[in-house]
């Protein structure tokens, strides 16, 4: 099989989702750094990989993919027999899909806004909007109440095993845990145990190391 190339940035949470999957699957890959500061993602040749001008993108021979969650699902299915099994069969897969959708449509919009306000705006010399933070903290609290209920009856979101549904949360959880929002995870015992468990995975440690070596 042709080599896997991931175009992105080690500080991009969406790119980190793909790196975590590749490490879980113990696959070799090449990182092609896209300089977001220089706007490389909005120009050719990157636009040929993702016409929406966002990282990450994956290239493997003539296969070109974008959207981090589509990429992780391709890797998990294509390399089902390698590394950690990140997917399930039958009805379990349907439940796994539910929680992947929950992450993409409930968790991600709110946590991405909080990360932008609390981490990235200060990083770029911009001012945090405290009203946006308050509004989204309240939304996140309600979402995490649902997670607390789910995780009190299931060790991981989809089933008793770590799957893509859990993995997809890692980048935003790890970034948000460096902010005042950590208290929202800590206040919920099952959520807190789940966060500790999934962030301690060796594959995730490799993604974190990529950022510190950056
Ligand atoms: N839904 C996309 C989101 C990708 C995304 O938001 N990427 C960010 C970096 S984490 C980006 O490229 N931002 C630059 C921009 O939108 O111009 C995915 O999951 O791949």
Image (spheres, grey):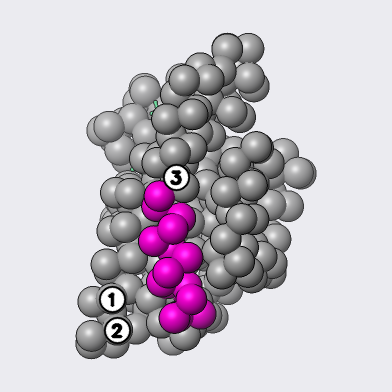
Q: Residue at x 43, y 63 (%)?
A: 147
From the top left corner, tell me how far across and down residue 16 is, in percent.
53, 50
Compared with 126, 186 (above or below) is: below
Q: Main secondary structure of the magenta part?
A: helix
Q: Is residue 29 left or right of residue 49?
A: right
Q: Secondary structure at mark 1?
A: helix
Q: Residue at x 53, y 34 (%)?
A: 115
Mark 1 touches mark 2? (CB < 8 Å): yes
Compared with 6, 27 (above or below) is: below
Mark closer to the observer (2, 3) = 3
Nearest the camera: 12 or 133?
133
Numbered-mark total: 3
Query: For mark 2, does the 10 Å Cα neighbourhood hold few (<14), some (14 to 19), or many (20 or more) residues?
Result: few
Q: Is residue 212 left or right of residue 93?
A: right
Q: Residue at x 44, y 58 (%)?
A: 145
Dot 1 or dot 3, earlier in sequence? 1
Compared with 109, 193 (above or below) is: below
From the top left corner, tell me how far across and down residue 119 is, in percent.
61, 29
State the mark number for residue 140.
Answer: 3
Residue that carries the numbered disc 1 in the rendered image: 95
Whole-number angstrom distance, CA of label 1 to CA of label 2: 5 Å
**Image quadrant in which you'd find residue 164:** bottom left
Dot 2 or dot 3, earlier in sequence? 2
Q: Which residues are magenta?
A: 142-157
- For ligand 1, tell me if the residue under mark 3 lies within 8 Å: no
From the top left corner, tell me how far across and down residue 179 is, in percent.
65, 37
Query: For mark 1, does the 10 Å Cα neighbourhood hold few (<14), some (14 to 19), or many (20 or more) residues?
Result: some
Residue that carries the numbered disc 2 in the rendered image: 92
């Amino acid at each position: 099989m042709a080599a896997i190339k991931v175009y992105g940035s080690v500080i991009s949470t969406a790119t980190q989702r793909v790196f975590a999957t590749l490490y879980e699957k113990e696959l070799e890959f090449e990182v092609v750094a896209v300089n977001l500061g220089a706007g490389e993602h909005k120009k050719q040749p990157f636009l040929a990989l993702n016409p929406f001008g966002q990282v990450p993108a994956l290239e493997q021979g003539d296969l070109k993919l974008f959207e981090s969650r589509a990429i992780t699902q391709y890797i998990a299915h294509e390399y089902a027999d390698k590394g950690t099994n990140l997917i399930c069969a039958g009805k379990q897969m349907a439940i796994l899909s539910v929680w992947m959708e929950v992450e993409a449509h409930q968790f991600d919009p709110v946590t991405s806004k909080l990360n932008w306000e609390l981490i990235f705006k200060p990083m770029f010399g911009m001012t945090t909007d405290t009203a946006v933070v308050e509004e989204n903290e309240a939304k996140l609290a309600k979402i995490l109440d649902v997670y607390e209920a789910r995780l009190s009856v299931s060790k991981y979101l989809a089933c008793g095993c770590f799957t893509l549904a859990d993995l997809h949360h890692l980048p935003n959880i790890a970034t948000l845990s460096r902010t005042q929002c950590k208290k929202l995870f800590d206040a919920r015992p099952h959520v807190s145990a789940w966060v500790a468990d999934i962030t301690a995975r060796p594959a995730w440690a490799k993604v974190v190391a990529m950022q510190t070596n950056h």
